[in-house]
Image: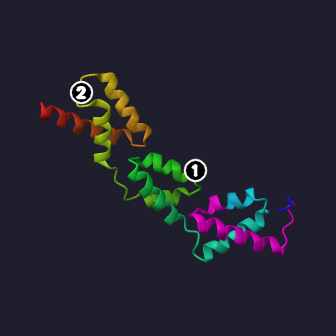
Amino acid sequence: MDGRQVCEEAQYRMAAECAAKYLARRPLSAAMLKKKLLEKQFCEQAAAYAVERMRVLGAVDDVAVAEVVLRSYARKGCGELRISQELRVRGVSDDVIAQVLHAFEPDMDAMLKLLEKRLHGDVSDRRECEKAMAALQRRGFTFSQIRATMQVYRAGVNEDK
């Protein structure tokens, strides 16, 4: 591109070709694809055309992208707040985020493993417990999920004694 913002017919075609190349590498949300096209100096209309063209062809699907991100971050032991933040960064709409997270259940085992890694079965030090809970919070779990997991962890520690 020579940097001109004049939209010619050829630019629409080139934008669609560029969009297809991006999507061949990895799935992108419509917003991320448009952003990448604009960064490549395509005009607004050509970028919008290319995104819509890819949507019609079934190559752009924000729900599918959101589901991939959800599975990936859930495998990493992240909670819904962290996942929704990542989806927003990727340009996924709040409606799609709500749709995808509707049935999401946090991985209690992953949360318990993190607590065990941090606390090693010692829940007597309040400061260390707070640090462990803060680590869960940074991973995107809600306060109620963290509190419930901490209760389960404490009950398990007390049983072992």
Q: Secondary structure at mark 1?
A: helix
Left or right position of 31 against 123: right
Left or right position of 101 against 125: right
Compared to residue 99, the image places residue 148 above or below, namely above
Q: Is residue 131 magenta?
A: no
Badge 2, how many Cα within 10 Å: few under 14, some, many 20+? Answer: some
| Residue 122: mark in rendering | 2
User: Which residue is located at x 58 percent, y 72 percent?
Assistant: 59
Compared to residue 121, the image places residue 59 above or below, namely below
* Residue 60, percent from left and from top: 58, 69
User: Which residue is located at x 57 percent, y 75 percent?
Assistant: 58
Q: Which image quadrant is residue 31 in?
A: bottom right
Could one spot residue 12 in this view of the protein? yes
* Residue 142, percent from left and from top: 39, 42
* Residue 141, percent from left and from top: 39, 43
Q: Residue 130 or 14: which is nearer the viewer?
A: 14
User: Which residue is located at x 21 percent, y 33 percent?
Assistant: 154
Q: Name the residue carrying label 1.
A: 89
Q: Secondary structure at mark 2?
A: loop
Badge 1, how many Cα within 10 Å: few under 14, some, many 20+? Answer: few
Could one spot residue 49 in this view of the protein? no
* Chain-order first, disc 1 or disc 2: 1
Q: CA distance from mark 1 to mark 2?
A: 37 Å
User: Which residue is located at x 74 percent, y 69 percent?
Assistant: 15
Magenta residues (range): 4-33
**Which mark is nearer the camera, 1 or 2?**
2
Say which quadrant the C terminus sits in. top left
Q: Amino acid at mark 1?
A: Val
Say which quadrant the N terminus sits in. bottom right
Compared to residue 3, the image places residue 9 above or below, namely below
Q: Is residue 11 magenta?
A: yes
Dots 1, 2 in contact, CB < 8 A: no
